[in-house]
Image (tube, rainbow, N blue to C red):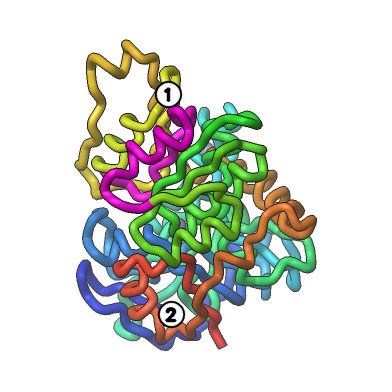
Amino acid sequence: MRAVVLPAFHAALELEERPVPAPSDGQVLVKVLACGVCHSDLHVVDGDWARPMPMILGHEGAGVVEATGPGVDRVRPGDLVTLCWAYPCGSCRICARGRTWLCESSSAGRHVLPDGTMRARRADGTGLRQYLAVGTMAEAAVVPAAACVPLPTGVPAEVAALIGCGVATGVGAVLHTAGVPAGAPVCVVGCGGVGLSAVMGAALTGAYPVVAVDLAEPALALAARVGATHVVSGADWPARVRELTGGVEYGFDCVGSARVVGGLFESLAPGGTVVLVGMTAQGATVPVDGYRFPDRGYRLLGSSYGSSVAAVDFPRIADLYLAGKLPLDALVTRRTGLDGVNDALDALRNRAGGRTVIVPP
Ligand SMILES: [Zn+2]
Ligand SMILES: [Zn+2]
């Protein structure tokens, strides 16, 4: 099998030929059918987030179960599965509270399998970590069984892949983290895969108006196609958004930027909520006005993985897609092979909008 390996920060990704590993206890061998190229991949490549190397990159993947190791009963060979990049341990305090997306005991954050091992190896025997324990920029991957979420048949693999990160993150930020009610004015800043998904989530809940903000015209055109009622660009966007809405009640930063958060506070109605969905570089801070924030009763929420319980919410999103209520096909703007990943990362750097999906042969 071939896999995309990041040898070190800022290095070009390398395509390596590796033997296909067999799944051990509690593990599943998945043939990867599609993998989205997400900003979280770019943050690692560009050194914004410290992560151990070398690593097989990719975390927004879907595929078909090829083989299961001993003790696996949640999936069977032939199942279409989306991979959850924050698989829950199922037994820690956080999981017991139902906040499985925040599990602290999962090995996903260490980029190894639940038993602490690395199943993929380089030719010289060096262990290869898999990003978030899945490492889906590959023709196949051995992953934790708990990371496999079966989806209903009829969902295209590329849509299934996007459900596993960008869609769950964006739709979930609106539905689960913020709980946006019908009729609430909403602003989404940043119309990449996550932001467009947040726009779809806002349209689904009946939020109004749904204002999308981005610097790039193609991204705004896509936002209008998937449910934005108004689109805004330009440096004066906070004032424009205020004019259009009379003050938004929920503002979503899908970029991960101090300037965006500052702009959202400027466009907010009293009692409004800013939701941080995009992530900044490690160590960066965002501005909170210590006078206005309490005086105007603002709220600031962090949204990880759209506060999604993967086993429940991934199939639900798939059902909404199949019912025509979430136009997820519109997110896929480019397709490439594993050898096109460096170009796909450049498209993200250049804010080309939408999503590139890697489709292994
Ligand atoms: Zn992602
Ligand atoms: Zn847990």
* Residue found at the very far top of the displayed protein: 295
Segment tinted magenta in the rendering? 233-257
| Mark-to-mark CA distance, 1 and 2 | 48 Å
Q: Residue at x 44, y 67 (%)?
A: 218
Percent of width and height locating residue 286? 24, 35
Amino acid on which the number 2 mark rests in the picture: Ala
- Residue 253 lies in the magenta-colored region: yes
Where residue 338 appears, x then y in whole percent?
45, 83
Q: In terms of depth relative to the viewer, which is nearer, 97 or 277?
A: 277
Q: Which mark is residue 3?
A: 2
Residue at the (73%, 52%) spot, across then down? 325
**Residue position for label 1:** 269
Q: Is residue 181 visible?
A: yes
Q: Secondary structure at mark 1?
A: strand
Q: Earlier in the sequence, mark 1 or mark 2?
A: 2
* Nearer-the-camera pick, 353 or 240: 240
Q: Quadrant of residue 24?
A: bottom right
- Does residue 97 belong to the magenta stretch? no
